[in-house]
Image (cartoon, coloured by chain):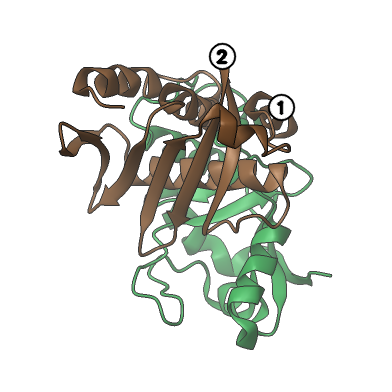
Chain colours: A green, B brown
Amino acid sequence: MWLLHGTTRARAENIVQNGPNLRFVEPGGVGVAENFSFTAEGTPSALGASVAYASGKATAFPNERGPALVVVDVPDEVVRAAALEHLSLFAGLIKYDATAETGELIALCGGVIQFDPGAALNSLTATWGALVKEIRGVP
Amino acid sequence: MTRSQTVEDCLRRAFEPARRGVVGLTEQLLEAFAGGDVEFERVGDRCVCRWDADGGTQETTVPLPPAAFRTILARIAMLCIERSPNSVTPYRGESLLTVDGGTTKVVRVAFVNTPEKQQLNLKSVSEKASAGGGDQQSLVESSRMGV
C-alpha cells in the first residue's frame, strides 16, 4: 500500500535515508514526535491531507527547502498492524472488529495510518531500507 | 457549566465507546460539551478536564490516552479547516463550529496540538453572538465530507 507523509524537503530526505524517527525534535521545540503518520494514497482522510501537512511544515520552517511528500510502499500486513495498534491505544473508546478489512480499520482511524511505538513500527523500521520509496514535490 | 454532576454526565456521554471511529468519537465529545465551558489538557501521560464551579476550577482525569487525544485534536483542526480554509493550522487555532446534538449549538473551539502541548478549550457561544457568525459549518455536514 502506498503511503504518504507530508513534511519539508529537508526532513523528507532524512526520513528516506534513515527511516521514521519518533525522537525527532523540531527546531526550537522541546517535545518529541512520539508517533509517525501517513495517509493512504488515493484515500480521503478526516484528519487532513498529507499535502496540507507538508505545506504547513514548510511555512513554519522556511529554511527547510519547501514542502515535500515521502511516498513509500508499505506491506499491507504492516499497515494493518499499525491500524490495529493505533485503535488499541484508544483504550476501548472506539469499537472495532479486529478481523475487519484493513480499509475499514483505517477509516476508523480517520484515514490515517499512525505508527506508534510497537511491533508495527519495529517492522516498518526494520525493513525500511528495502522498501520502495520516493520524494515528491508539492506544488 | 457550574455543577460537577453535569460535567460528569457530559464526560460519560463524551467517552462512550464510539462505533464510527475517530470521527464519531470527536462528534461525541463536541456534542456532549456543547453549551458548556471546559478545557482538556494533556498532563504527562494523562488527560485532564477542567471547568469552573463554585468560584474555583475543578479538575478530573478523563479516560483519554494521549495518542487518542492528539488524534481528536487533529480531527477538530480538520473540521475548522473544512469550515473555513486556512482558518487554523493542524497545530493550533480557534474557530466556531456548529454541533448538532439533538439541538443545534455553536461552540467556540481553541486548540493546540504540538509535541510540546496538547490542549482543547470548548466554550459556549450565545445565540446573539453566534447569529452574526453566518458561516459556521454543521459538524454533521463536515463528517460527511470526511472518511
Q: Is residue B69 above or below residue A130?
A: above
- B63 on left or right of A59: left
Q: Amino acid at mark 2?
A: Thr
Q: Is residue B53 above or below residue A54?
A: above
Q: Amino acid at mark 1?
A: Glu
Can you see residue B11? yes
- A3 on left or right of A88: right
Label 2 element class: strand
Q: Nearer the viewer, residue A122 or B103?
A: B103
Residue A110 position in % (x across, y down): 59, 37
Can you see residue A105? no
Which residue does the numbered mark 2 point to in the structure image? B103
Residue A114 position in % (x across, y down): 51, 48
Q: Which residue is pictured at 47% across the width and 62% down the height?
A: A126
Which residue does the numbered mark 1 point to in the structure image? B141
- The residue lying furthest to the front in this view is B128
Give the CA distance from mark 2 to mark 1: 15 Å
Please tell me in which quadrant of the rendered image residue A5 appears: bottom right
Q: Which residue is pictured at 63% across the width and 45% down the height?
A: B80
